Amino acid sequence: MSPHVVFFLEEPSAEAMLEGFLFKVLPKNWSYRCVVFEGKQDLESHLVRRLRGYCVPGAKFVILRDKDVGDCKVIKKRLIQKCKEAGRQDVLVRIACHELESWYLADLSAVQRGLGLSNLLQYSNQRKFVSPDQYPHPAERLQRIAPSYQKVGGSRSIGPYLDPNNTRSHSFSVFVSGLRRLCSIHKKK
C-alpha cells in the first residue's frame, strides 16, 4: 500500500485548496484523503472519535484549522490533547493564522492567476500583504481586492497556483515544512 495522509479540515474551502496544491508538496507515490467537518466546533467535538476510527495501516494525519480570533497556541494545545485522547501522538497540527485567506493574500500572484485577474500585484509590497498573518479578517480583505472571490470556488482556483516556497505567511510556511517533514520521515522508515 502506498503512503497515505489524512487531512482533518474545518471547512470545504480547505479541501478545495488542497486538491490543487498537494501535488506540489506530496511525493508522487503518496495518496491522501480529506475529512471535512462543518466548522471548527464540529471538528473539535468529533476529532477523537474520527481519529480512533481511521484504520488504514500506516496512515499519517494532519489537522488544519483556522485561528480566527483565538490564540493559536491554545488552539494547537487543545487539538494535540484530543489527538492524545485518541491514542495518536504523531498527528501534525497546523493553524492557519487568521484564516486560510491569509495564505492567499501572501501569494497575490496565485490569486491573480487563479481568479483570472490582472491588477492584484500592485498590492504585493503593502505591509498587510507582506505579512498577512498579522492582520485579522483576511477573507474580507481578499474580497475587497478580488470581488469575484468565493470561498470554495476561489480556493479551488487559487490552490494550483500557490507557491509552496512562499514565506510571506508564516503559518503557510510552517504548514508546508511540516508536511514535507512528515513525508520525509516516512521515507526514512
Image (cartoon, helix red, strand yellow):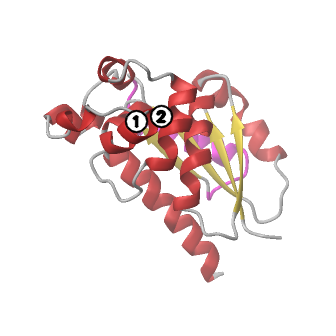
The reply, left or right, for residue 86 in relation to residue 53 is left
User: What's the amino acid at mark 1?
Assistant: Cys
**Residue 141 counted in the magenta span:** no
Check residue 72 in the rendering and tell me which mark sits there, or answer none.
Answer: 1
Q: Quadrant of residue 30?
A: bottom right
Q: Quadrant of residue 4?
A: bottom right
**Residue 75 counted in the magenta span:** yes
How far apart marks 1 and 2 lie (CA) works out to 5 Å
Q: Nearer the viewer, residue 24 or 78?
A: 24
Q: Which percent across, then down, holds residue 39?
A: 61, 23
Q: Nearer the viewer, residue 54 or 162?
A: 162
Q: Residue at x 58, y 68 (%)?
A: 183
Check residue 75 in the rendering and tell me which mark sits there, or answer none.
Answer: 2
Residue 103, visible in the rendered structure? no
Residue 137, visible in the rendered structure? yes
Magenta residues, as a range? Answer: 70-90
Q: Is residue 64 placed above or below 149 in the rendered structure?
A: below
Q: Are marks 1 and 2 in contact (CB under 8 Å)?
A: yes
Q: Main secondary structure of the magenta part?
A: helix
Q: Residue at x 58, y 59 (%)?
A: 23
Q: Is residue 15 placed above or below 62 in the rendered structure?
A: above
User: What's the amino acid at mark 2?
Assistant: Ile
Q: Which percent across, then down, holds residue 188?
A: 60, 82
